Image (cartoon, coloured by chain):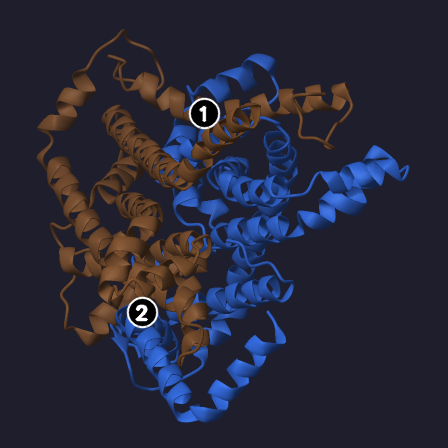
Amino acid sequence: MTLLDEKEQVVEEAVNPRLERKARKQESWRGFFHAAPAYVYLILFFVLPLLIIFVFSFGSRSNTGKPLLENWNFDSWGRLVDPLVRTIAIRSLWMALLNTAVCLMIAYPFAYWIATRAKQRTRTLLLIAVLIPFWSNFLVRTYAWRMLLGSDGYITQLGEATGLWGRMLFTQPAVFIGLLYGYLPFMVLPLYAALERMDWGLIEAGRDLYASGSKAFRKITLPLSKPGIIAGSILVFIPSLGAYVTPDILGGAKTNLLGNLLVTQFQAARNWPFGSALSGAILIVMLVATMIYFRTGGRTI
Amino acid sequence: MTRLHHGAAARPGVDRSLAIFGSLVFAFLYLPILVVVVFSFSGSESVGRWGGFSLRWYEQMLKNEQLLNALENSVVVALVSTVVATVLGTAAALSLDRYRRWVGRGAFDGLLYLPIIIPDVTMAVMLLLWFTSTGVIPLGRGSITLAHIAFNISFVAIVVRARLAHMDPAMEDAAADLYANRWQAFRRVTLPLIMPGVLGGALLALTLSLDDVVITSFVQGPGSTTLPVYVFGLIRRTVTPVINAVSTLMIAVSMVLVLASLTLQNRTGRRTESKGDRPMKRKPLIEKAESRENQQ
């Protein structure tokens, strides 16, 4: 880039400001037209449905359970603080937080182990080995635990033989194992992505400056893998909070989570306004969690 | 520690315990799936007890008409939603990556991430409310397909966008310099380069569509049940080894899809790489010739 080039550019711009503006406008239109089909589609089948939740949540219902868009009220939102709802909400929140924490504790050393293999080939093979259960059907993976935790399942037999535990199916621990098993890969993948692209020379530099192994880890590796930690936590926390299939298959009446409560409103209970308020509330929690994520600077999903 | 990344050298003891831990995690990930697969070949009526090798549950699976009907619905919905979502998602990714300034770009960028992070129960509820209150589209295969497209667009767009980010935009400029029009430049230059991303996104969409339970169970109509929703119903009602057989089939399909996507990406990646390498390979020959000249 010489001075001459710069001067030429300046001259061109001065001569043709209108042409430039026209070109920019054209580019802008082109970008819009490329996005338009997807944009319109998502507005039709995502944004408007999203808004309709809030409309229904202020509605009422007839004696037969038919949702009515009249007699607008705040009752459904008020019911969110019912003791029963509160118990389930706290249980869900606790399960989601616990699951996120345990997933992180298991996935971090695991992803670290894969990411520190020197051979690219080894890393790729190990990663594929993580991807296969990740891509396998979620329902099937949950069902597997129903087999293992049932009365004659292997885990139950093992527990009875050692005298450490009995049948876990339809209890809280069973639901927790199901959630952990279901969402663990969601934590491994972003952590691996963050650790894999890390510059290991930095650790070496730290060690050269007499940092201990654990200090180098705390001051270098951990901060650099933060985007992965945040992305993984979001990817585990949100679906755990809205989990429905896992508690439905592995849990019982006393282990209902928000997802079950929500689905019941649209099936047996036939209370659409309350169900809508509940999904609205879950949505708001989710949006806040995501906003915190984007604020903290992570961008990799 | 030659096996480790340079600079990541941990004490051998730490590395060994990491390796043991890693193997345990793999065992945790694989053993449950393995149990399902093994017991699908058991002749016993009881789900968890081995009763000798038998294919009777597969036979029963193929005789179950409801199940086959559900399988057909699944395949139709998955194929249609994948094709539509791949086209729309690729165009969306192009618009976000290639065009930096257009009206509503920021909102679109955010909106595109939402279907990925939203819990599926919420998406299920909102689509049910939308379809029933507008009443334009009856609940059935059509509504299921529309719902699947809605979440698949985002996944395709993200995968394609990641691929576009690695592509050199100068390639398109070069094509334009050689008098290619926009369509030719896209068809001959951009599309082949992002093809692994497009196919990867399409395979992901296919998998997600074939896996979905919650959203489909909300927006389905009579007779339009998909395979996972049907299996979900089976699991809730009874425990029968037929579920093991269907599960094994579903695991096999997803494994084929993962391996297909990985080999596809690998092969296409290698092809573009080798094209780029060609001038490099010639270099030693030139050097050789030069050194020969020098000797003379």
Res. A270 in view:
no
- x, y percentage for residue A59? 34, 80
Q: Mark 2 — residue?
A: A42
Graded by Cα atoms within 10 Å as few (under 14), some (14 to 19) or many (20 or more), the crowding at tag 1 reads some
Badge 2 crowding class, 10 Å Cα cut-off, few under 14, some 14 to 19, many 20 or more, is: many
Which corner quadrant of the image does residue A120 belong to?
A: top right
For badge 1, the amino acid type reads: Tyr
Q: Which mark is residue B223?
A: none
Give left or right: position of A206 versus A277: right
The chain letter under disc 2 is A
- Residue A49 image point, x, y percent: 32, 72
Element under disc 2: helix
* Disc 2 + disc 1, Cβ < 8 Å: no
Along the horizontal axis of the image, is A92 left or right of A132?
right
Which chain does tag 1 point to? B
Nearest the eye: B274 or B72? B274
Instruction: Measuring from the top left, give residue A30's x and y in whole percent.
Output: 31, 76
Vertical arrangement, residue B168 with respect to residue B295, above or below = below
Chain B: what color?
brown
Asked if residue B10 shows in the view, the reply is yes
Q: CA distance from mark 2 to mark 1?
A: 37 Å
A101 above or below B42? Answer: below
Which residue type does callout 2 highlight?
Answer: Leu
Chain that appears blue: A
Q: Which mark is residue B30?
A: 1
Circle 1 — which element? helix
Q: Splitting the image into 4 quarters, where does residue B169 fall?
A: bottom left
* Residue situated in front as seen by the camera: A137 or A156: A137
